[in-house]
Image (cartoon, rainbow, N blue to C red):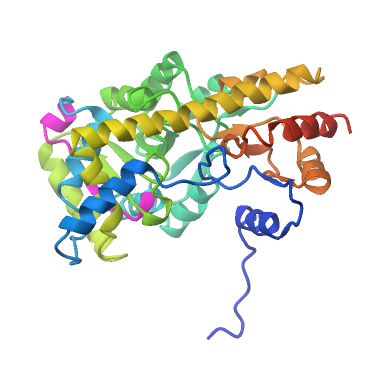
Amino acid sequence: MFENVKAIPGDALLALMVAFKSDPNPNKIDLGVGVYKNDSGQTPILNVVKKAEAHLLEHEQSKGYIGATGAPELAPLLQGLMLGNDHPIIQQGRIATAQTPGGTGALRVAGDLINAVNPDAKIWVSDPTWSNHFHVFAGAGVEVRTYPYYDADHNALAVDAMLESIRQIPAGDVILLHASCHNPTGIDPTQAQWQLISQAVAEQGLVPLIDCAYQGFGEGLEEDVRGLKMLLDLCPEALITTSCSKNFGLYNERIGALSLVTESAEHCQRAFSQVANCIRANYSNPPAHGAAIVTTILSDQSLRQQWETELAEMRDRIRRMRSELVSSLQNLNCNRDFSFIEQQKGMFSYSGLSKDEVLYLREHYGIYAVESGRINVAGINDRNLELLSEAINKAIQQ
């Protein structure tokens, strides 16, 4: 069965992680892996998570299955976090939410759902996008195409080209949009641009799939879903994938969700049965522990306030490192303008560094970044900022 199987090339980011770990350089810097790190270079467990787990340890009564669509008490909490409890879509029963194994699991279930209910539909993703989007949707049997997003000449959103492309997509196709903290560029649309994008998506009769993996990491919990809400104001149907990996620091608990929005409560019930069927044929039941942590935090006013405070601390640290990197490069009289980095949102940044410059940083300084020039700003801290700035300044002079 396996004697003629061909090996598939390994994931480039995972290979980068392996190379970093094996590098003996004591001053090496990891700007590749996509997790938050504090100023000590650690991916911490939030204090509020520890409190929630202590509560669960004392009060949890069972390790039984929680059902295909997950813990029922979690769904309204995540819907309220995204939209606010009084949003008309919630009040009208036009949204249903299934817990999934992480945001990636949510995307896969979304792909399976698209293939089940509209097998001719294609999904359009930004160029560039998170590389795993291609694998997830292709694995679900959905054809993936791209629309323009990044203007490399100006390190900005290619909004005109993006809108022109959207207006050429066939009605009924699905378009994936990042709610905030675009991965990998860090470039988000402005409110005015979101309005134009939402109008184009609605007028073209497309179904938006909004990937909301970083709520709270950009500008704030409410600010990071402004574009999502604009889309829902104009589009009668939508899919929303959410992740609690980043904003709760629950990377290895695999807690995410898929929400679907329909024109009516009746449509919602019917469509959600298809979601449950897709899940049952895949992993059957999602893991319970991460969901219990999030439910405990969001349903307790004191814990929720502590979570929002810790989330703001992570967000503010990322912002500070963006600002300090730009200032440090300016202080070195760097001959390239990196000020755009300060305007980007979230952990990731398209730095403008070329592949050759990235490889120079790796070879000469042990600084690891993705060859596209994408860096994880959360990998920068007060201890490595000076070395990183000097290395970048040297790299762009080669």
Q: Quadrant of the C terminus?
A: top right
Q: Is residue 72 above or below residue 127?
A: below
Q: Can the viewer see residue 338? A: no
Total number of numbered discs in the rendering: 0
Residue at horizontal 54 percent and vertical 45 percent from the top? 34
- The quadrant holding residue 277 is bottom left
Given residues 65 and 232, the one toward you in this image is 65
What is the span of residues highlighted in magenta in the rendered image? 88-102
Q: Can the viewer see residue 46? A: yes
Residue at horizontal 34 percent and vertical 56 percent from the top? 101
- The quadrant holding residue 298 is top left
The image position of residue 215, as x and y in percent, is 38, 33
Which residue in the rendered view is the most extreme toward the top?
192
Given residues 123 and 261, the one toward you in this image is 261
The image position of residue 179, as x and y in percent, is 41, 31
Given residues 144 and 217, the one toward you in this image is 217
The image position of residue 122, as x and y in percent, is 43, 45
